[in-house]
């Protein structure tokens, strides 16, 4: 395309595993164009003056990787942001906090003895780093969005979940194809990966796809439970009452604080 007619900026890809995690974001994009590709619904629209493509990946690493590859190949996104919920692993991470990924790892991957534990075979990588600039922006956006929990959630929800002063953490998020729901499971993960802050089921797979495509990526996870014997109960209520508002608030702030994009495949991140 010639300089008189430059290509439009690449959209930002927004991914969540569950429709509930996308609900409020989609409500903010009433004119979005809906398209079904590979049994996935994609919504192309605008949010805070930026082009975005939102998609529900469904649950698990294969679903997340397939969705992300489709998102990149069909929409040419310039960066990918994963939102949603996770279970806490580190002692200082509480329900209602937010974890922004600095790196991601598949905790259930083990190709030994041919490859080191957790290393993705034939890549030499076990921990996929998130984009440093995007991590910094996402953490700042999360802190700003959560500065006034009463205004964001209302007094009843704040009281129910103890959201009086949610904290933003940055560090390792681990992913695997099972819901970590017992104290024994979480203790085992903490012993194996003592620096892991949170556990979920999609992030590391998306990070691997973005790594292979050379695209910036970050995961922004609201902590719904302690990944222990109460996880199933905590998860359901948090998903219903809190997670969508978390995701919409943080993503809106992330986009609102970003400078105008510079050009094709150059989102403002």
Image: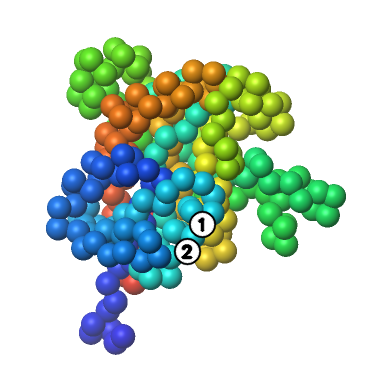
- Give SS at disc 1: helix
Q: Residue at x 32, y 44 (%)?
A: 19
Q: Position of residue 13 (x, y in %)?
A: 36, 57
Q: Is residue 131 left or right of residue 43?
A: right
Relative to 66, is 87 above or below? above
Drawn side of residue 173 relative to residue 45, left or right: right
What residue lies at 51% left-to-right and 46% top-to-bottom?
60
Vertical comparison of 34 with 221: above or below:
below
Which residue was labeled with disc 1?
65
Report which quarter residue 208 is drawn in.
bottom right
**Does 46 appear above or below 262?**
above
Query: Counting other residues with Cα less than 10 Å from the Cα at mark 1, is it few (<14), some (14-19), or many (20 or more)?
Result: many
Q: How many marks?
A: 2
Tell me residue 164's x, y (percent): 32, 15
Where on the picture, by quarter, is residue 106? Answer: top right
- For the C terminus, give its image quadrant: bottom left
Disc 2 target residue: 69
């Amino acid at each position: 395309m010639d300089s008189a007619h430059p290509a439009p900026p690449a959209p930002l890809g927004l991914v969540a595993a569950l429709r509930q995690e996308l609900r409020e974001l989609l409500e903010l994009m009433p004119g979005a164009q809906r398209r079904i590709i590979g049994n996935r619904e994609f919504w192309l629209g605008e949010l805070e003056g930026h082009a975005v493509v939102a998609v529900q990946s469904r649950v698990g690493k294969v679903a997340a990787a397939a969705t992300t590859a489709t998102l990149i190949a069909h929409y040419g996104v310039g960066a990918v942001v994963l939102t949603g919920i996770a279970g806490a692993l580190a002692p200082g991470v509480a329900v209602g906090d937010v974890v922004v990924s600095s790196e991601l790892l598949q905790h259930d991957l083990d190709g030994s003895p041919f490859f080191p534990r957790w290393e993705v075979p034939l890549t030499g990588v076990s921990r996929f780093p998130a984009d440093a600039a995007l991590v910094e922006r996402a953490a700042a956006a999360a802190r700003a969005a959560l500065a006034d929990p009463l205004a964001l959630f209302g007094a009843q929800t704040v009281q129910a979940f103890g959201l009086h002063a949610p904290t933003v953490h940055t560090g390792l998020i681990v992913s695997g194809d099972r819901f970590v729901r017992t104290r024994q499971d979480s203790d085992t993960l903490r012993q194996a990966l003592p620096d892991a802050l949170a556990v979920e089921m999609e992030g590391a797979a998306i990070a691997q796809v973005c790594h292979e495509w050379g695209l910036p990526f970050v995961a922004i996870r609201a902590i719904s439970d302690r990944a222990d014997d109460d996880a199933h109960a905590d998860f359901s209520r948090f998903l219903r009452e809190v997670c969508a508002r978390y995701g919409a608030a943080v993503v809106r702030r992330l986009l609102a604080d970003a400078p105008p994009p510079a050009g094709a495949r150059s989102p403002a991140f």
